[in-house]
Amino acid sequence: MASLTEFFNRQESENLKGISHKNNIIKRNIIAHMALNGECTLSELTKELHISVPTITKLVQELVSENIVTDLGKVETPGGRRPNVFGLASSAIYFAGVNIGRDEMSFLISDLQNNIVKEESCPDFELQDRPQCLEKICSKIEQFIESCGVDRSKILGMGVSISGRVNPDTGRSYRYFTSSEESLSQIIETRIGIRVLLENDTRARCYAEYTTSKSQNERDVLYLHLGRGLAIGIVMDGKLYYGKSGFAGEFGHIPFFDNEIICACGKKGCLETEVSGIAIEEKFRKLVSQGVNTILRDKYNANEPIRIDDIIEAAKRDDNLSIELIEEVGEKAGKAVAFLINTFNPEAVIVGGNLAEAGDYLMLPLKSATNKYSLNLVYKDTKFRLSKMGQSASAWGAAMLIRNQILGLA
């Protein structure tokens, strides 16, 4: 067999014909089936893939010899011959995930079964729409790939997530690094030499949340990301929803308020202008400048930056101003979520992002307002839960998505 990279990245349009081409397709289907369903026997593969026993036996043995599939030995049965069970070898194939955040980059390597085997972060970073920043992004990715301890030839793809409007099909960001004729995914792919999928950070995190925490019956889920900005990820019938151009989920930019606050998108009154970490930070500074008391006054007087994480920590220490601002955002967010669940009728709403760290200070007013402004039957049908994932969620989701694309699971 050709190298793993050639094997999985080979396009159907290439001039591959005959038995060899057919067998390669069956092999990929075997790997995809095991990735989705776990360990299985040859008879189970034969039944699920509708391939003859001799062909399945031959191709599985080839995958075993190529160290992609592992023979796990005999499985116990009520009687008769005990069949061998086979599963994917976790160390055969890896995928990289990268999240390009506003003030931090995170990196990870995951195996065939979506387990994280290596992760790092780079806090010394600021996302700017400048060529120097793009150069730093590529350099940091290259450094991680070189030092991650995984054979580079086994890393078949890399998912890269970034904030703002992103079209995964074209590989373009419509907010950052737009001056080049090449798409952002092409630029990184050429530099690093690994196949790249570009994805929106909230959508990538939504997929990671859905994949790792969903119950068996959940098929329609909304992920509400309350960080310094505001966005949603949408899962419909078990799949991410993108919209025509890949821009679905820009919930923070609906005209929700009759105010004169200019949003980052250039319009006034967007939901994000009052329901976001940035909105809390700005209101906090304004109120402190007017003399409102807070345990963060010394930090303010010293002209040190006060971020949403500082305000959340102050709320946990019973700072009244911080608690009031977070609860106010929770109430406004809940009214907006009522609109969402009335529209989509999801099974679950997952709340993540920096503000999720505020716990009940955010969730109690959010759920109360959602209950008040939504249809009663819809609210009762919707579960609410806080994200339990860490900072690596977007990078992990991006790695899962490139894995699915390469294995044909998308």
Image: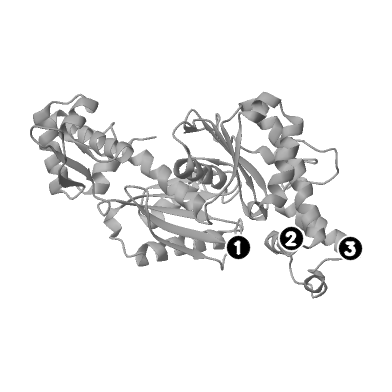
Total count of labels: 3
Three-letter code for the amino acid on which mark 1 is drawn:
Glu
Per the image, the residue denoted by label 1 is 126
Q: Is residue 357 visible?
A: yes
Mark 2 → mark 3, Cα distance in angstroms? 15 Å
Q: Amino acid at mark 2?
A: Ala
Mark 3 or mark 1, which is nearer the start of the sequence?
1
Residue 395 is labelled as none
Q: Are marks 1 and 3 in contact (CB under 8 Å)?
A: no
Residue receiving disc 2:
315
Verify CB contact (< 8 Å) between mark 2 and mark 1.
no
Position of the C terminus by quadrant: top left
Residue 186 shows up from this direction: no
Residue at the extreme right of the image, as rendered: 290
Question: Given the image, on which type of amino acid does mark 3 rest?
Answer: Val
Q: Residues within 10 Å of mark 2 (few under 14, many from 20)?
A: many
Per the image, the residue denoted by label 3 is 292
Seen in the picture, residue 342 relative to 257 is either above or below; the reply is above
* Label 1 element class: loop
Residue for point 23% across, 44% down: 87
**Residue in the picture at 79% in, 63% down:** 319
Question: Camera-side residue: 72 or 226?
Answer: 72
Of residues 200 and 363, the one drawn nearer to the viewer in this rendering:
363
* Callout in the foreground (1, 3): 3
Q: CA distance from mark 2 to mark 1?
A: 27 Å
Residue 77 on image: x %, y %: 16, 35
